[in-house]
Amino acid sequence: MKSALIGNIAEELREEFYLQGNPQPPHEFLDSALKRAAGAGICVFLLGIILLDFLTCAVAAILVFVPAFFAQIRIAKSKSSSEAKKIGAVLPFALLRLGAELNSGMDFDLCIENISNAKYGVLSEKLKNQLGSANRSGLPIRHALAELSGRTKSREFSRALAYMVSAYDAK
C-alpha cells in the first residue's frame, strides 16, 4: 500500500517536474520531503516529551508529520500552475513585441532570442532555458519551441508557441 501511494505521487511529480523543467528526480524530492517532515515530527515529539506526556507527544508528532509531508508535495505541484498564470499575464506583451520586430524585418530566430532576453519573467526564463538547451544539443529553434509547447501548463503559451512554429515553417 505504501509503495503504491508513493509510486502514484512520484508519477504525478514526474509530470509536474517535467512541465516545470525541474531536473530533480521525484524519488529524491520525496526522500528529502520525508526527511524534512520527519524532522519536524521529531522536533515536536521531543518538545512534547519535555512539556507533556508520551502519548500526546506521539499524536502531535504524527499530526505535524503528515501535513508537513503533503504540504511540500502540494507546493511542488502548484508551482507550474503559478507559472502558467504569470506567463498568461505577460504573453500578450511578448507577442506584441514579436509581431513588431517581425514586421520591422528582423529575423525570426533573433526575435525569439530578444524575447528570451527581455524582462518577461517566467516566459523569458523558460524561453532562455529552452533555447540554451537547444543550442547545446544542436536542435533548431522551431523544434525547441515545439518541445516547449508540450512542457507548459499555460494553454495560451502553448498555443502561441504552436503558432510561432507554424509561422517559422511558413517563412
Image (cartoon, rainbow, N blue to C red):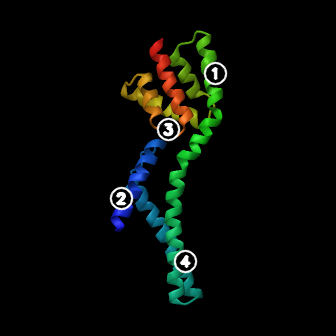
Q: How far apart are marks 4 and 3 (CA)?
A: 39 Å
Q: Which of marks 3 and 1 is in front?
A: 3
Label 4 sits on residue: 44
Q: Nearer the viewer, mark 4 or mark 3?
A: 3
Label 1 sits on residue: 97
Residue at the spot 43% in from the left edge and 52% down from the top edge: 13
Q: Distance between the residues labelled 1 and 2?
A: 44 Å
Q: Which of marks 1 and 2 is in front?
A: 2
Q: What crowding class fits label 4: few (fewer than 14 Cα within 10 Å), some (14-19), or many (20 or more)?
A: many
Q: Position of residue 166 (x, y in %)?
A: 47, 20
Label 3 sits on residue: 152
Label 2 sits on residue: 7
**Residue 21 seen anywhere in this rendered image of the structure:** no
Upstream in the sequence, badge 3 or badge 1? 1
Upstream in the sequence, badge 1 or badge 2? 2
Q: What crowding class fits label 3: few (fewer than 14 Cα within 10 Å), some (14-19), or many (20 or more)?
A: many
Q: Distance between the residues labelled 3 and 2?
A: 23 Å
Upstream in the sequence, badge 4 or badge 3? 4
Q: What residue type is labelled 2?
A: Gly
Q: What element carries label 3?
A: loop
Upstream in the sequence, badge 4 or badge 2? 2
Q: Position of residue 2 (x, y in %)?
A: 36, 68
Q: What residue type is labelled 3?
A: Thr
